[in-house]
Image (cartoon, grey):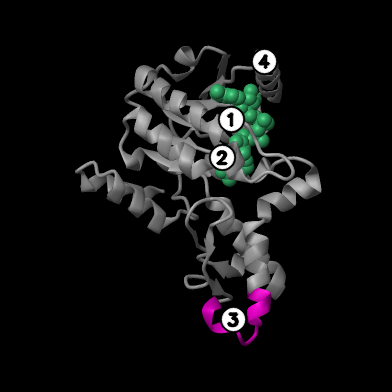
């Protein structure tokens, strides 16, 4: 059975909940046989690797290491969830101090050990900021670094499907804007509900108050998972992060990108090469 590519994919934070699920998802999606797992916490990392070996994925070449140099050398693609997760009562921004330092070192390590990396996805929170820090220290082009904020859009899709009691597949083109945090903006303007613009339904079939409540549920979607499960979400960020890197690896385009934010970032850090902007727009 073929893989999308044979290039090396490194998963940073692989001993954690998101990292270990990302590794499994990438193997199930047959993205590449060459997956390297990195985490500073060796015992749990070895445990993740052992579990993946026990899955017996056909053709897989899974390696693991606590040496970041070994992990990143020759990596064409990197996804990182390596950092602290928030607990009940915390916002994503509460993680900033510690995770910003991790992002700085992550960026420097990319620059040292895999300066030719093709694409990096940053998951650890607050993802927009840690991604930007990693981008700056890695010296990559803005089009080479993506951050995971797609859950806000998929949560909007899910909440609308529940509200209108229709299949999520009938909710199209959900978009949220701004950072992946308490200040995100949940807009109605692009969304279609069973082919009809959501903005035309608000105030008619959906009272304004219901829309305001739904927006809050989207913003608090991550907190809701912590309340229900006693820990930060991991299945959905793992799956969507791997869908993002899959798009960069030559798989199908990623549906839940945030165009406005990406364009702003590219404008803020111009690389003088418009092609990369277009490449991101097409693939991710
Ligand atoms: N962007 C999103 O949508 C989204 C959604 C959910 C969670 N997250 C974030 O993802 C991150 C990981 O969450 P999790 O549930 O997997 O947490 P986890 O605690 O299960 O795993 C984190 C892993 O990171 C490792 N780690 C710690 N310091 C590291 C470093 N300097 N370099 C590499 N790895 C390091 C830890 O050893 C651990 O194995 C958190 O920051 C969390 O807030 C993001």
Whether label 1 lies within 8 Å of ligand 1 gets the answer yes
Q: Say whether residue 150 is visible.
A: yes
Magenta segment boundaries in residue numbering: 198-211
Q: Quadrant of the N terminus?
A: top right
**Residue that numbered label 4 is attached to:** 46
How dense is the environment of label 2, judged by Cα within 10 Å: few (below 14), some, or many (20 and up)?
many
Please identify, in this view, whether the residue under mark 2 or under mark 4 is nearer the observer. 2
Please identify, in this view, whether the residue under mark 1 or under mark 3 is nearer the observer. 1
Residue 272 image-quadrant placement: top left
Look at the numbered discs 4 and 3 and tell me whether their residues touch, using CB distance below 8 Å: no
SS at circle 4: helix
What's the mark number on residue 202? 3
Residue 123 image-quadrant placement: top right
Q: How far apart are the alpha carbons under marks 1 and 3?
A: 39 Å
**Residue that numbered label 1 is attached to:** 83
Whether label 3 lies within 8 Å of ligand 1 gets the answer no
Q: How far apart are the alpha carbons under marks 1 and 4?
A: 18 Å
Look at the numbered discs 1 and 2 and tell me whether their residues touch, using CB distance below 8 Å: yes
- Residue 18 position (above or below residue 201): above
């Amino acid at each position: 059975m073929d893989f999308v590519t044979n290039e090396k994919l490194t998963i940073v934070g692989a001993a954690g909940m998101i990292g270990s699920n990302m590794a499994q998802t990438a193997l199930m999606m047959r993205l590449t046989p060459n997956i390297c797992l990195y985490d500073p916490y060796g015992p749990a990392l070895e445990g993740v690797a052992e579990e993946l070996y026990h899955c017996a994925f056909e053709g897989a070449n899974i390696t693991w290491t606590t040496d970041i140099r070994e992990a990143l050398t020759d990596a064409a693609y990197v996804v990182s969830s390596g950092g602290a997760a928030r607990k009940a009562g915390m916002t994503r921004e509460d993680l900033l101090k510690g995770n910003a330092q991790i992002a700085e070192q992550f960026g420097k390590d990319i620059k040292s050990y895999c300066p030719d990396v093709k694409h990096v996805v940053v998951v650890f929170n607050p993802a927009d900021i840690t991604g930007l820090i990693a981008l700056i220290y890695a010296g990559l082009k803005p089009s080479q670094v993506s951050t995971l904020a797609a859950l806000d859009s998929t949560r909007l899709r899910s909440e609308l499907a529940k509200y209108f009691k229709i299949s999520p597949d009938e909710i199209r083109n959900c978009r949220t804007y701004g950072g992946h945090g308490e200040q995100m903006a949940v807009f109605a303007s692009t969304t279609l509900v069973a082919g009809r613009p959501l903005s035309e339904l608000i105030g008619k079939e959906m009272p304004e108050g219901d829309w305001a409540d739904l927006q809050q549920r989207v913003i608090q979607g991550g907190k809701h998972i912590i309340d229900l499960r006693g820990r930060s979400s991991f299945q959905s960020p793992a799956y969507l992060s791997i869908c993002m890197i899959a798009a960069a690896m030559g798989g199908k385009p990623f549906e839940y990108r945030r165009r406005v934010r990406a364009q702003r970032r590219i404008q803020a850090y111009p690389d003088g090469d418009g092609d990369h902007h277009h490449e991101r727009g097409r693939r991710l």
